[in-house]
Image: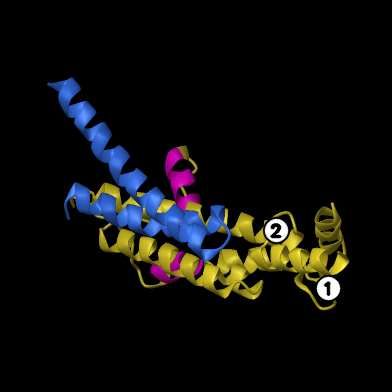
Chain colours: A yellow, B blue
Amino acid sequence: MAEARARASARQEPRAGSREESNPLLYCALGLAVPGLGHIALGRRGTGAVFLVSIGLLFVCGIRMEGELFPFEAAAPLTLLAGMAEMGAGAFYVAARMLGLGAGNPEAPTYEYGYAFLIVAGLLNMLVVLDAWDIATGAKESADDTAAAGEAASAAR
Amino acid sequence: MSHFAALVLFAALVSPAFACLMREGWAARLRFTAWAFLSFVGFAVGIGWIMYLAGG
């Protein structure tokens, strides 16, 4: 009971200078620009590093497998959706476009794998951005918050 | 690159990201990573065998 009350008050009372005072959209924008950067800015460096490495490697492997960065063609809705999904990889997508990578080679045996990796990298980063939003708004309790609530409950007893 | 190698690479890269999204604490994340990796590979191999046997 005391623990539940402490948890609720820990959620309701943001600490001075804490992330609750910042705009959650800022963390989402950071995460969308560079995978994992939103989590790093929220103080979850290890988690952010995991996202950066796994999404980055997925994208790089997709390019190496001769996958295609699909163009935005309104006439082909599935191609449009695939292009939008790939764009979710943020900085990796922009860098690949600027370097002229991702032309795709449909004759390569790994072509389908390649664009599947690219699409999943983008979609996974969109999930990561939503996770950053949940953490920034307090909808998802972090391990730090749980520990703080536990300490508060011990102090209340 | 073989189909199996691509599958293993995909599972190895996606599993830790899902673990960080769905679990709190590094021990739980490590367990979830192993479980998700084995599930990805196991289900793909299992479904492959089913298709092989069903297709004759």
| Residue visible at 55% across and 56% down in the picture | B21
**Residue A106, how many percent across, how many down?**
23, 49
| Residue located beneath label 2 in the image | A141
**Residue A76, how many percent across, how many down?**
44, 39
Residue that extends furthest to the front in the rendered view of this protein: A157
Confirm whether residue A9 shows in the render. Answer: yes
User: Is A133 inside the magenta-drawn segment?
Assistant: no
Q: Specify the segment rendered in magenta.
A: A78-96
Question: On the picture, is A107 further left or further right than A86?
Answer: left
On the same chain: label 1 and label 2? yes
Query: Which is the main secondary structure of the residues drawn in magenta?
Result: helix
| Residue located beneath label 1 in the image | A15
Residue that extends furthest to the left in the rendered view of this protein: B56
Residue under mark 1: which chain is it in? A
User: Is A92 inside the magenta-drawn segment?
Assistant: yes
Within 10 Å of the Cα at label 2, are there few (<14), some (14-19), or many (20+) other Cα atoms? Answer: some
Confirm whether residue A70 shows in the render. Answer: no
| Residue visible at 44% across and 62% down in the picture | A55
Picture quadrant of residue B46: top left
- Which three-letter amino acid code belongs to the residue tagged 2? Glu
Q: Secondary structure at mark 2?
A: loop
Of A48 and A90, the residue lying toward us: A48
Of B24 and A110, the residue lying toward us: B24
Picture quadrant of residue A147: bottom right
Which sits earlier in the primary sequence, circle 1 or circle 2? 1
Residue under mark 2: which chain is it in? A
Residue that extends furthest to the bottom in the rendered view of this protein: A17
Q: Is residue A82 above or below residue A134?
A: above
Q: Secondary structure at mark 1?
A: loop
Q: CA distance from mark 1 to mark 2?
A: 15 Å
Within 10 Å of the Cα at label 1, are there few (<14), some (14-19), or many (20+) other Cα atoms? Answer: few
